Amino acid sequence: DAGVIQSPRHEVTEMGQEVTLRCKPISGHNSLFWYRQTMMRGLELLIYFNNNVPIDDSGMPEDRFSAKMPNASFSTLKIQPSEPRDSAVYFCASSPWDRGQGQPQHFGDGTRLSIL
Amino acid sequence: GDSVTQMEGPVTLSEEACLTINCTYTATGYPSLFWYVQYPGEGLQLLLKATKADDKGSNKGFEATYRKETTSFHLEKGSVQVSDSAVYFCSRSNDYKLSFGAGTTVTVRA
């Protein structure tokens, strides 16, 4: 079975440019998460979608970051304009989350983003 | 808030040695507990889980027992291999969220 698919795997761009990261969750999973991982801050939850609706975006660092989920099989995380401090590995995860069941999340391989 | 504290690394071991990574969690609610493993250049993979007190999760020779009385979920393996070199994350559920520990880097030498 296909897991969570993220693209691109690596992205290098200059500051000020727009960056779009993409994610295809596991089919049938109704919850989708975007995380950022850095050495300094570890894993940070950026935003959580349930049934394509953003439920919690309290982790989105600032207005330069936006995320969408137009349908159950696709999500994007956009940074505009990008800054060097946005350099990190960005992970997408999905889960068949059901309240009270404690379902694990399934992670993609991440996008390694470098802003020069 | 809900949090997880795990043993700081890095941990370096010889092949066939015993591994223990300590993990404690805040005791609010009735969380599920997880161990994830991250190999270089990859995402986090679920290693094992436990959903209630006294449950034991196990996979690939790793084990962890949900201890409510000590709010702990320590990861153990009796004989590690070079292929076990990775970063290990302890995690607890918090409604729809997962709270992660800082991660423990384990290096196993031949």
Image (tube, coloured by chain):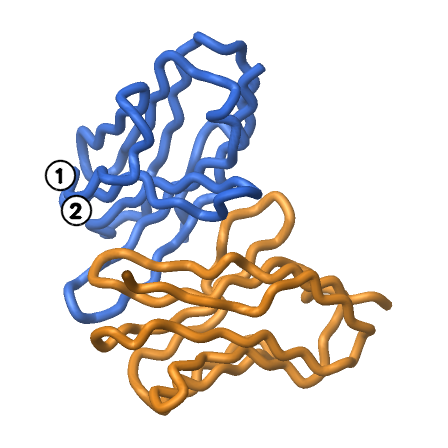
Residue drawn at (27%, 25%), measured in percent from left and top?
A66
> Chain A's shade in the image?
blue
* Residue A52, position as x, y percentages in the image: 16, 39
The amino acid sitting under disc 2 is Asn
Given contact means CB atoms under 8 Å apart, are the residues at marks 2 and 1 in contact?
Answer: yes
In terms of image quadrants, where is residue A22? top left
Image coordinates for residue A72, horizontal then vertical, percent: 20, 39
Residue type at the position of mark 1: Val
Question: In the image shown, does A27 or B102 lie closer to the viewer?
Answer: B102
In-image side of A45 versus B102 (left or right): left
Q: CA distance from mark 2 to mark 1?
A: 5 Å
Q: How many marks?
A: 2
Outermost residue, right side: B110
Residue A108 percent across, percent down from the top left: 44, 45
Find disc 1 in the rendering and name its residue: A53
SS label for mark 2 = strand
Q: Quadrant of the C terminus of chain A?
A: top right
> Disc 1 is attached to a residue of which chain?
A
Q: Secondary structure at mark 1?
A: strand
